Image (cartoon, grey):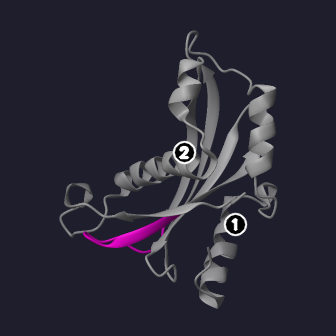
Amino acid sequence: MHKIPSSGYGIRFADCDPFGHLNNARYLDYFLQAREDHLLQAYQLSLADYYQQGLSWLVGGHQITYLKPAAYREQVIISSMLIGADTESLLVEMQMTNEAQTQLKALLWTKFIPVNIQSGKRQEHPAEFMAFAQSIAVDDVNVSAGYDLRLKAVVAAFKKEAPRV
């Protein structure tokens, strides 16, 4: 099973600032859309199916660093991977690169909280979901070292070698 799916996206005019760069807030939209695409394409996991079962996820927080601008009409590659999973939350890392995957444009960590649709309250991940999450989680990211150290390591990897993913 491929644990780090990726896909290409074109930067659209409506998503850019007056300088022709992807608006900072829109990076989040691109990343979240990519993750949904990756779940469906790589793992055949439909968020809509979970929603119908009464489970969904809310964003608990983002940590993002913008390194290089993504420009209007540019093709970018977005990769995503599950780097942490427990009954209370998921932690997903996403990277945006240029099409050749030689330049890191942004790094994002997003924490997702499982929520019961009917009550609107937190809900623990079901056991079968946890088994799935553990099967796709990567184990070579030291989450306990924190975001800043991870950022430094990813940037250093891009400086040493490319493409990375």
The disc placed on residue 159 is none
| 67 displayed left or right of 53 | left
Residue 128 image point, x, y percent = 78, 30
Residue 127 image point, x, y percent = 81, 28
Residue 64 image point, x, y percent = 53, 57
The front one of 28 and 137 is 137
Task: Report the residue marked by disc 2.
Answer: 40
Classify the position of the N terminus by image quarter.
Answer: bottom right
Residue 115 image point, x, y percent = 61, 23
Q: Is residue 140 magenta?
A: no
x 74%, y 33%: residue: 129
Q: Secondary structure at mark 2?
A: helix
- In this view, the residue farthest toward the top is 119
Tell whether label 1 touches label 2 (CB within 8 Å): no
Q: Main secondary structure of the magenta part?
A: loop
Task: Report the residue marked by disc 1.
Answer: 150
- Residue 71: tell me if it is visible: yes
Image quadrant in which you'd find residue 122: top right
Range shown magenta: 66-78
Q: Residues within 10 Å of mark 2 (few under 14, many from 20)?
A: few
Question: What's the amino acid at mark 1?
Answer: Arg
Q: Residues within 10 Å of mark 1 (few under 14, many from 20)?
A: some
| 61 displayed left or right of 9 | right
